[in-house]
Structure formats: C-alpha cells, structure tokens
Amino acid sequence: MLQLLPQPVEPADEPAVKTAPDRAYVRLAAQIRALVTQGEFAVGGRLPAERALAERFDVSRTALREAIIALELQGVVEVRGGSGIYVCELKPGVARLPAAQEAGAGPFELLRARSLIESEIAALAATTRTDADLDRIFEALTTMRDQVTDKSANEAADRRFHLYIAQSTGNSVLLATVTSMWDQARGPIWDKIEQHFHTQALRQASQEDHQRIFSALVAGDAHAARQAMRAHLERVIGEFAQGWR
C-alpha cells in the first residue's frame, strides 16, 4: 500500500517587530516641524499647552515631551521653564536628530525595559552575589554619594552600580543586555531630559534608592531587591512628569 509522506511544514513567519509606541515621538516631531514650516505655529509664538497638543495628535504626554526635546535639539523650538515652548525661526540646514536617535528606541521605552529586566536581575543577584561583588557595588554606591554634585562622575558611578549588579548574576547575557540598554539611552535627547527634569533633589532621592537596592543585596533578599530596583527606575520614569525648568 502506498504510504503518503507528510508534507513539510512551512516555517511560520517571524514575528514582525512593531514600531514601539514610544517611537511616536520621532514621527510627532516631524509633524510639528511640518506645521511650523507651513506657518500654523508662528515664529516667536508659543505652542499650545501640552494637554491640547497630546490630544490633537493622540499621543502620550511622554511621547510629546520627547518630541519637544527632539525639536529643541534641532533648533525648531525653545523651552522656557515656567513660561512655555516657543517657536524659533527656522534656518537653512537645521540639524536633524543623530541617525542613532532616529533609528533606536526612545529613552522612555528603554527605561520601561530596564524597569522590567533589571528588577529581575536584582532579585537574582541577591541570591548569587559574592562578597567581592558586594565590594564592587559598594564602591560604585559610595562614589555616587561622594560625587553627587559632579554630574559626569556621578553618572559613571551610577552606570558601574547597575552593571556590577548584572555581573554578579554570573550571566554574561544579562550583563550584555544591561550594558546595551544603558548605552542606548545615553545621547543628546537624554542630556536634554536631564537638563529639564533632573533636579538635585531627584539625584539625592536616586542615591537613597541605590542604598535600598544595595541593602537588599547584602541581606540576600530577592523580593526586596526586586522591589527596590523597580521603585528606583519608576522614579526615574516619573521625572518626565515634572515641570519644565
């Protein structure tokens, strides 16, 4: 009897990588810039309130703020703390965003990813860290405290703190992931975000967050480490809701 061979199964299509919602800021910046070019938003005039703009373009407030910062970097608008956002005169050869910023994830998108991933990394690290790991993490923590008024030194120590925690898991993939997320977020847009929203008080609060994370690691408390890391990164995300300055 002739036996039919099973038909080969066609491989399923790879899941499509959707444009992340937070990338909306790139498209939104282009839309607002087009309206400036068309004269709808007059040079020297103030843009409508954030709420009105967010509703008009059906975007989140965060995406709107990222778009405004992108436009500020291009010289299209000027943010005046306590006053509003004003349209600048467009000049020939206005700078575009760096290609890496246009193609990559936005800072808010990366922070959300970090909140999810690094909280679990902290929980794992609480069960795997060695005394040598704790020494390295403590060095970064104390440097952050001692250099709280030096932005560059403080940020370098902050980076080491997070990478040392990932390293203490003994998982090279997790370390590479945290390194990539951290480095992708840094750039002109992030610098502007810090300029507008990251106050000295928030930097001090961040230091206290890091102390809680470290204490949980010392105690070997995975739950507390997870919660402390998540609370820390959610605080950073919350900076986007602060008033412009």
Image: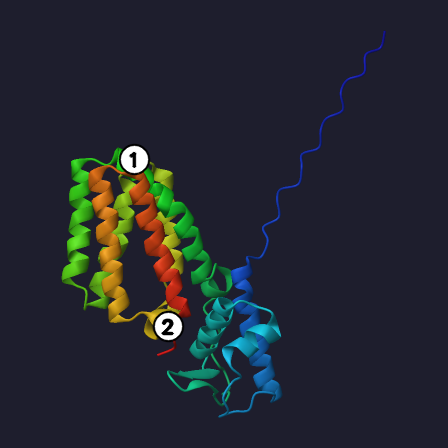
In this view, the residue farthest toward the right is: 1
Spatial CA span between label 2 and label 1: 35 Å
Q: Is residue 221 above or below residue 77?
A: above
> Is 83 situated left or right of 33 in this image?
left
> Is 131 situated left or right of 94 in this image?
left
Q: Say what amino acid the circle numbered 2 marks.
A: Lys
Assess disc 1: are there few (<14), some (14-19) or many (≥20) residues with their C-alpha within 10 Å of its C-alpha: some
Q: Which residue is labeled 1 in the image? A: 170
> Is 67 situated left or right of 58 in this image?
left
At 24% across and 41% down in the image, what residue appears? 217
Sequence-wise first label, 2 or 1: 1
Q: Is residue 16 above or below residue 235?
A: above
Residue 171 lies, in percent from the top left, at: 33, 36
Residue 79 lies, in percent from the top left, at: 41, 82
Residue 133 lies, in percent from the top left, at: 20, 40
At 30% across and 38% down in the image, what residue appears? 222
At 55% across and 57% down in the image, what residue appears? 20
Secondary structure of residue under mark 2: helix
Colour mode? rainbow
Q: Which residue is labeled 2 in the image? A: 192
Secondary structure of residue under mark 1: loop
